[in-house]
Image (cartoon, rainbow, N blue to C red):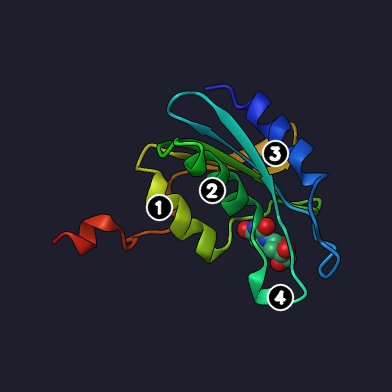
Amino acid sequence: MEYRELIREALKYRENAYVPYSRFKVGAAVIMDDNKVYGGCNVENASFGATNCAERTAIFKAVSEGNKKLKAIAVVGDTSTYTAPCGICRQVIAEFGDENTDIIIIKNENDYKIKKLEDILPGAFTKEDINK
Ligand code: THU
């Protein structure tokens, strides 16, 4: 699958990052199983723990619009290298993704790597664990 559009969307949403504390802008974009795309950015808070990462902003936007199946998520930070999703975001990706979900870790528009959930959160705790 060609992810150029999703990557562009993540780069676009990075511009909206609200980062007065870290100054570290992050952008993300998700494509859901109905092919709808949602973008997100990190939104910080004076109470640092209330900060929301870009990935979760994008996923929560999609879920709140009724789209719960995550086909792919793209994420880009504010460095010249790759920015990997944080642990909390990996857990949220695990909630709405599956073994086929692509996690696109962007360095720049022409340089990115694609991972699967099992690569970034092996042995994840999921709803299946609760229903055992
Ligand atoms: N951040 C994200 O938005 N996504 C990640 O996966 C890593 C961290 C944000 C949170 C905070 O606003 C800033 O990057 C520095 O940690």
Pick whichever of labels 4 and 1 is earlier in the sequence: 4
Foreground tag (2 vs 1)? 2
State how far apart marks 2 and 1 are (Cα). Answer: 13 Å
Instruction: Say which residue label 3 marks.
Output: 10
Q: Is residue 50 visible in the rendered structure shown here?
A: yes
Q: Horizontal placement of 129 versus 31: left or right?
A: left
State how far apart marks 3 and 2 are (Cα). Answer: 15 Å
Which residue is located at x 78 percent, y 36 percent? Answer: 12
Task: Please tell me in which quarter of the rendered image ligand 1 is found.
Answer: bottom right
Pick whichever of labels 3 and 1 is earlier in the sequence: 3
Instruction: Say which residue label 2 marks.
Output: 60
Name the one closer to the observer, 14 or 77: 14
Q: Horizontal placement of 129 versus 120: left or right?
A: left
- Mark 3 crowdedness (10 Å alpha carbons): few <14, some 14-19, many ≥20: many
Amino acid type assigned to the residue bearing label 3 in the image: Ala
State how far apart marks 3 and 1 are (Cα). Answer: 19 Å
